[in-house]
Amino acid sequence: MMILEILTVAKEMDIETRERQGRRLTAREMRARQREQRRAENAIMEIAWSRLC
């Protein structure tokens, strides 16, 4: 049970850090970051699907 609590706290701290960084970004930078994240996720999905075939 203790490990789960530690992981929860660590995850919350990570989320808070990302939120703070997000507030500092301009709208253009935020869109660029989201676009980059979508591309990375799509690439991962492509790799996963190609391995299934």
Image: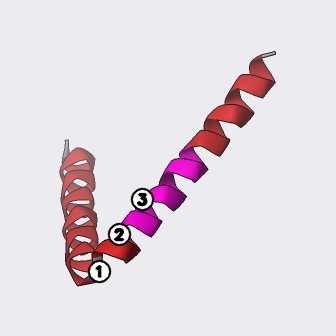
Q: Residues within 10 Å of mark 3 (few under 14, many from 20)?
A: few
Q: Which residues are magenta?
A: 30-41
Q: Is residue 11 above or below residue 41?
A: below
Give the labeled residue for mark 1.
26
Of callouts 1 and 3, the N-terminal one: 1
Q: Position of residue 5 (x, y in %)?
A: 18, 51
Q: Position of residue 15 (x, y in %)?
A: 24, 62
**What element does badge 1 sit on?**
loop
Q: Give residue 43's mark.
A: none
Label 2, label 1: how many angstroms apart (C-alpha)? Answer: 6 Å
Q: Residue at x 59, y 41 (%)?
A: 42
Q: Main secondary structure of the magenta part?
A: helix
Q: Residue at x 24, y 84 (%)?
A: 24
Q: Position of residue 2 (x, y in %)?
A: 20, 49
Q: Residue at x 27, y 53 (%)?
A: 7
Give the labeled residue for mark 3.
34
Quadrant into which the C terminus falls: top right
Give the labeled residue for mark 2.
30
**What element does badge 2 sit on?**
helix
Label 3, label 2: how many angstroms apart (C-alpha)? Answer: 6 Å
Quadrant into which the N terminus falls: top left
